[in-house]
Amino acid sequence: ETWSRRLMLMLLVLLVGLIAYIATLDGANEGFAAYLVPNFSHILDPNLIIAAMGQAFFSMSLGVGTMLVYGSYLSKKENLPTIGASVALVDIGVAVIAGMLIIPAMYVALNNGVEIFTPEGALIQGDSLIFKVLPALFETIGTVGLFVAFTFFALMAIAAVTSSISMLEVPVAYMVESKGLKRKKAVLLMATIIFILSCVIILNFELLFGFVIALTTEYSQPLLGLALCIFAGWVWRRDAILEELERRFDLSGLEEKASRTNK
């Protein structure tokens, strides 16, 4: 939790700094327009809907049960609806800010002669964007590009670490509570398994990286999210859910009354 707070603050500072720099380059205005001006003709495109769902589920860590596990650690004094809304708004805010960096940067790359569109006319995405298009952009910037590239990939590393910490908690909590392992052993075991799988992907990068990204973000996460909804709505006792929500609302109301009385 401590490192997540520190790293997320650093992430936001780096994001804002890079956006400010990219905004000064030729082609950035076209990127901002492409990102911020909506095109409603694509709103019912099935592929767009699947991609958007995958992004939402992955970004919120809903499909792997992270929010469910984190929720189990909350104090009974917390107001669940308020916390849920706060998490969603902050997450969407960070995602929007990240888009204000990536899309304008791609159009700056286009202005510098770097190809950013696929043969079908869509923007390049995934591993090709991160490891081909953006490094090509940094090369065209010159000496400053080295600093920008270092900052950008530091930002990527921070985002990866904070996400990994949260998602690691799910299997660790399962091993501790269901299998009786001590927390340190559970962390080491799951981290070792993830490290081995990651090495397999790295050693077969061209073949596996894009496939794993598409599989996890676009397909498995929404399906797992649906499974969690079925569990919460029909498997887990409904009266227990309602009782929990009612208790937290009542506690929130009592705290507000006490605060007003003290004032």
Image (spheres, rainbow, N blue to C red):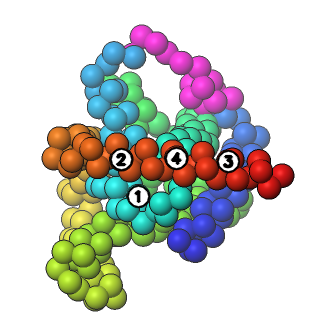
Q: Nearer the viewer, mark 1 or mark 3?
A: 3
Residue indicated by mark 3:
256
Residue 180 position within the rendered picture, expressed as x and y whole percent measured from the top left: 20, 84
| Image-based side of 195 in relation to 73, left or right | left
**CB within 8 Å, label 2 to label 4:** no
Highlighted magenta segment, given as a residue range? 29-42
- Disc 2, SS: helix
| Image-based side of 141 in relation to 69, left or right | right
Q: Residues within 10 Å of mark 2 (few under 14, many from 20)?
A: few
Residue drawn at point x = 76 percent, y = 41 percent = 24
Residue drawn at point x = 53 percent, y = 18 percent = 38
First in residue order: circle 1 vs circle 4: 1
Residue type indicated by callout 2: Glu
Residue 139 in view of the camera: no
Q: Nearer the viewer, mark 1 or mark 4?
A: 4
First in residue order: circle 2 vs circle 4: 2
- Label 1 – label 3 distance at C-alpha: 22 Å
Residue 121 position within the rendered picture, expressed as x and y whole percent measured from the top left: 38, 24
Residue indicated by mark 1:
71
Residue drawn at point x = 24 percent, y = 66 percent = 201
